[in-house]
Amino acid sequence: MSLTERASWKALTAHHAQVGTRTLRELFAADAERGTRYTLEAAGLFLDYSKNRVDDQTLKLLSALAEDCGLLERRAAMFRGDAINTTEKRAVLHIALRAPATQKIVVDGANVVADVHAVLDRMVTFANAVRSGAWRGHSGKRIRHVVSIGIGGSDLGPVMAYEALRHYSQRDLDLRFVSNVDGTDFKEATRDLDAAETLFIVCSKTFTTQETLTNAHAARAWSLQQLGDEKAVARHFVAVSTHAEAVTQFGIAAENMFGFWDWVGGRYSMDSAIGLSTMIAIGPDNFRAMLAGSHAIDEHFRSAAIGQNLPVLHGLLSIWNNNFLGATTAAVLPYDQYLKRFPAYLQQLTMESNGKHVTQDGKPVGVDTAPILWGEPGTNGQHSFYQMIHQGTRLVPCDFIGFCNSLNPLGTQHDLLMANLFAQSEALAFGKTAGEVAAEGTVPELVPHRVFEGNRPSNTLLADRLTPETLGALVALYEHSVFTQGVIWGIDSFDQWGVELGKVLAKRVQGELAAPNPELKHDSSTNALIRRYRSSRNH
Ligand code: F6P
């Protein structure tokens, strides 16, 4: 049955027709307890969802939708290790990456949790050796710089986690990330480095990704040029991959490879060995604390009733805003400088997962999926795009993320920061009417310009402070929110066929750029662009 034919979907459509015009001002006026009633807490994360245009009936109907779409069964199937990534016939077990060693999850007859902990233990040994200086470079020098090479899920999670947890990092180790095939990325990342003190971590699940392999080869050449000895590779390169053969072919020995498994999706892999750079930066204990934070949300997600389930509720509110209120976008606004890469990380997590147009059985979804996600840390965004969020014509539901305690207290600056967060969500929700603007003595012709419609939904997520546990919890919250939304839409949130066509076409064009006189058989635009590039470049 298609989603829009479901009774639960129809009930929500009818409910929206009835109450859709009700404003947040009216909803708050009708219930003095709303601001404390519409809250939920789990694993150190506190969510205030009262500034969403929902009431008890909306929430009840959304929960019914989740049940109707089989969320409970799908959730159980994921935790059991069923192949819920149907188009790739794979289990989806990032939850196993943070399961305690005592837990058992059996896939194809093997306990994957035991495998996870075996790799974790190897990572710990290696990370400790690099951190302590016991792991030396080829010439005997201590490693001072770690350059992680990867892209997509093999980059965005580690970059985000490193930036988010920089406060906990060993400061005499310098971490850098190279992802883009643009040579500028590699050149700028390495221009001031001494190869004798530099360790490269090549991260690629498949070990076939063009960008990563190209950069890895550039790194190899750069290292060998300075170190002048093939044997140096063993001390300066490690790999993280599921593809041992390709790693060995590249020239990285098996003992310098950290493995993971096909049941870990790229964008769900930051807790696997893909997080080796994170572990080197923050140390094994902090890394394990991050895993524990994610695990706490996993357990909550697995066991809490639908109406009391933080990720489920978060996902259902997104469905309401996207599919019923018509928002086509969502902003994530962390009021913490350390979370500056969190929106970029979430872009892949949400849009590569749920940017799909057909259901698992290949039928059109029939409704909009994956809202366009973007964001910047507050307060910077306030002086950039918030104008549009407040007074533009589009509805942009926002997630505000803040911490009660700063990791870098500086006078009253944290209060200032948080005052801005609270003020923004208040302004978005309640706005300012023409009457209020006029009552301030505004000249009549300026009144319309100074009116804030308000009625713009937001969530506020608060935690005590940004710790590895909190970060782990935040990540798992969004992962399971994405899962919840994918289940409602009936799509496969764990494949990414949409990135394939561009890769194939790029290979063809690459050949045409290299050939002396290629016959171009593209459309007239692509042909002309290629010709123009070929005649303008300097080689
Ligand atoms: O962009 C497609 C993609 O497959 C992502 O899903 C993945 O995270 C990224 O490429 C990198 O892939 P790999 O880790 O195999 O290099």
Image (cartoon, rainbow, N blue to C red):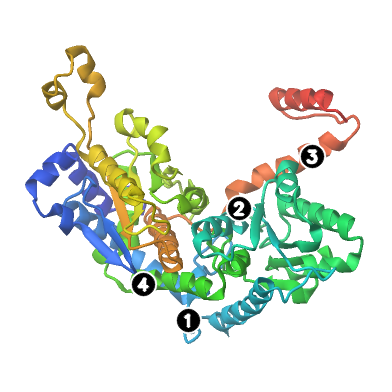
Give the quadrant of the C terminus. Answer: top right
Q: Is residue 58 above or below residue 199?
A: above
Q: Residues within 10 Å of mark 2 (few under 14, many from 20)?
A: some
Amino acid under disc 1? Pro
Element class at badge 1: loop
Element class at badge 4: helix
509 lies left or right of 51: right
Reading the image, the residue beneath label 1 is 100
* Viewer-nearest of discs 4 and 2: 2
* Sequence-earlier tag: 4 or 2: 2
Figure quarter occupied by ligand 1 = bottom right
**Residue 447: quadrant of the picture:** top left
Reading the image, the residue beneath label 3 is 510
Query: Assess mark 2: CB under 8 A from ligand 1?
Result: yes
249 lies left or right of 356: right
**Residue 221: quadrant of the picture:** bottom right
Q: Is residue 485 above or below residue 72?
A: above
Reading the image, the residue beneath label 4 is 302
* Sequence-earlier tag: 3 or 4: 4
Q: Residues within 10 Å of mark 3 (few under 14, many from 20)?
A: few
* Sequence-earlier tag: 4 or 1: 1
Reading the image, the residue beneath label 2 is 152
Element class at badge 2: helix
